[in-house]
Image: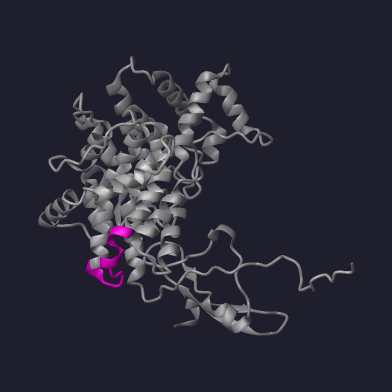
Amino acid sequence: MSKKDTITLIDNSTGKEVELPILRPSNGIPTIDVRALYRKLGYFTYDPGFLSTASCSSAITYLDGIKGELQYAGYPIEQLADHSSFLEVCCLLFNGELPSNEELTEFKNIITHHTMLHEALKRFYSGFRRDSHPMAIMVGVVGGLSSFYHDDMDIHNPNDRMIAAHQLIAKMPTIAAWSYRYANGLPFEYPRNDLDYAANFLHMMFNKPSEAYIPDPFMVKALDLIFILHADHEQNASTSTVRLTGSSEANPFAAVSAGIASLWGPAHGGANEAVIRMLVDIVESDHDIQHYFDRAKDKNDRFRLMGFGHRIYKNYDPRARIIRKTCHEVLSKLGSNNKYQELFDTAMELERIALQDEYFVSRNLYPNVDFYSGIILLAMGIPLNMFTVIFAVARTVGWISHWNEMMQDPESRIGRPRQLYIGALPRDYPKNDK
């Protein structure tokens, strides 16, 4: 390794120094390998939230927040949204390459014929209160899958890992739909092998014994797009949780269950639900929309407009550009007599003002994917508490792909972050003077 591929750190207090390698990615920001820092100088690094730390190497997803780029295995998300399907994207994320027509047909067949849940899993649902949040049910039921498949799985066997991926991708829509039906007192609807992935999910959600539900092809396509856009997003909180859990060699169902728990947080997967709650508050208030923009600009007011800006993207979220068009098409298809029209009108006015407001534009506070996806899901008739569940269904393939990648990475170690201790110095237990 040449000098230009290293960086030298010098401890001025001791005169000791260490050369740290500079790792060059195939795309993105060069990364300093600090593993020798503690061994040679006795220091840790301090990086709350890991904002400047690469926890692993990965070939699955690349994003550039400055340029507003997102790629799955090198393919721009815009091209995948236009030409691909969610199940094809699943193959791409897990295998690193697009499948041939024959491979995709075989994969679809495998997923279709693994959507059924073991009948004993029904009893898992009955253990929850009727008013349980569907995400709580998801955490429990997905974790419970490990009790059905754990004994037959060797996580170090590539074929067993692939089978686990198939089971999770196939069964997650059924688990999700059943969580909705249980909470609403509806009988469980079994999957149908004649429907594709998104249509089958909508069928299991909304079909009734007394009234057959026929999925609208337009809504099916919109949901498939939402699945594609949410399939993976690099080392976010929930993906990092799956990797950290899996690093202890926990089974993949437990790891994905942990990822679902992380996703549940309003700062992560619950953002699109927060958008709709904000719209409801605005509609039901006595203030005009400008009042809320003024509040958002007031540094002394903690209020903020949900669905604008992104922690990573300092440009327009590429997923938002794609889904914005679909959102407007869905609203147009519904017409002006739908029961959510006032919410939709409010959302579109927020979008209009934000895209023209210098404060928002200069700070790159554009509408993000959560702003549009929540509106589309509401238009489909999907209730608020199911929004994050939809996210979990889509992100399952990303989680299991990262878990699989980690399991075959020779540099992978059990996760063990360090800390900056700021507590009390050593002290003696007080003597009892009584």
Q: Is residue 226 visible?
A: no
Q: Quadrant of residue 40?
A: bottom right
* Left or right position of 33 against 428: left
Among all residues in the image, which is located at the extreme top? 337
- Farthest-out residue, front: 434
Q: Position of residue 148 (x, y in %)?
A: 29, 58
**Image location of residue 413, percent across then percent down:** 44, 73
Please check the rendered image and state whether residue 18 is part of the magenta-colored stretch, yes or no. Answer: no
Q: What's the magenta region?
A: 147-159
Please, which residue is most extreme toward the left here? Answer: 102
Instruction: Report the residue at 37% width, 18% height from top.
Output: 339
Q: How is the image coloured?
A: one colour
Q: Is residue 208 above or below residue 48?
A: above
- Judge whether residue 168 can be spotted in this image: yes
Quadrant of the rendered image containing residue 167: bottom left
Q: Nearer the viewer, residue 119 or 307?
A: 119
